[in-house]
Image (cartoon, grey):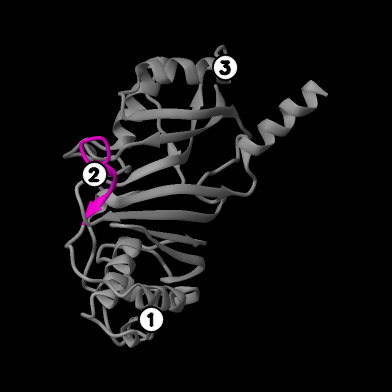
Amino acid sequence: MVKYAGLLQFKGTNYAGFQRQKNGTAIQNVLESTLSQINNTATVVRYSGRTDAGVHAWGMPFVFWGREDLSADKWMFILNRMLPNDMRALSIVRTSPDFDPQLSAVAKQYLYCATQERLGPLWDDFFAYLPNLPIESSAVISGARKLVGEHDFKGFSKKGSSVRSSRRKLYEVSVMFTHSRMYFSFVGNGFLYGMVRLMVGTLLQIGWGKQDLDFIDEVLSGNAVANYSVPAQGLHLVKVWLEPDPFLESVKANERDLS
């Protein structure tokens, strides 16, 4: 057996999150079951972080021990033939035995997509439908600026988290408005359970005039708790930055082979 690293893209609509579940079907359940069939033995994956039910991912890093007689390309081909239509492996590469996608994750980007009008069956599962209320975009942008930096985000997390520290650093928070759609992007060194959805909810409350800008300062100082969480279906894990990055190393190796 050798160790492989993979990037998994998935639509989370029909799943109970990424992490393996006993009383529901999670992404991990399906992925491990499929890998086990190919391996002819029980196979467990390790991944960079959990996602909630209904959340989508453009590329979730994971690792597994697999048969050495199959090349990485063959692994990806077979895996994609067997996975359901709402999952796809974007890359499979051989990696070092000590590579851990969770410990190697140095930053992540989440994107939240919201709309005030129905987009049709092809897009409805990827956007959260929000009330068609007047929104003050400048207030939302000012609130987003307050979130940038290193803070204690405990007040922006849901109960049930078992992390040792609730301090996180957000490198970038950006908001974009179009005709009836809103996009919220967050880049940080880590995120607490439910953190992104509570931050988006708070920014929307500020834009709707239901909360003052100072409310964010109160939450970050521990004097208040965010209480409006937007629906999961609008949340996307866009990218996970890894150090070391086995996918980048594989590209560099291929470039050396071609030179």
Which of these two is toward me, 207 or 101? 207
Q: Magenta span covers which residues?
A: 119-129
Look at label 3 and name its amino acid.
Glu
Q: Amino acid at mark 2?
A: Leu
State which tag comes first along the sequence, 2 or 3.
3
Image-quadrant location for residue 157: bottom left
Q: Are marks 2 and 3 in contact (CB under 8 Å)?
A: no
Disc 1: CA contacts within 10 A as few (<14), some (14-19) or many (>=20): many
The residue that label 2 is drawn on is: 119
Q: Quadrant of residue 3?
A: top right
Neighbour class for label 3 at 10 Å: few (<14), some, many (≥20)?
Answer: some
For the point 57% across and 21% down, the residue is: 72
Q: Could you tell which of marks 3 and 1 lies nearer the N-terminus?
A: 3
Categorize mark 2 by other alpha carbons within 10 Å: few (<14), some (14-19), many (20+).
few
Q: Which mark is residue 68?
A: 3
**Which is in the foreground here, disc 1 or disc 2?**
2
Is 182 one of the magenta-colored residues?
Answer: no
- Rendered location of residue 189, percent (x, y): 52, 62
Q: Residue at x 35, y 78 (%)?
A: 139
To which residue does mark 1 refer?
220
Residue 154 shows in the view: yes
- Type of amino acid under label 1: Leu
The circle on residue 6 is none
Q: CA distance from mark 3 to mark 1?
A: 49 Å
Residue 53 x, y percent position in the rendering? 25, 47
**At x 35% / y 55%, what residue is drawn?**
112
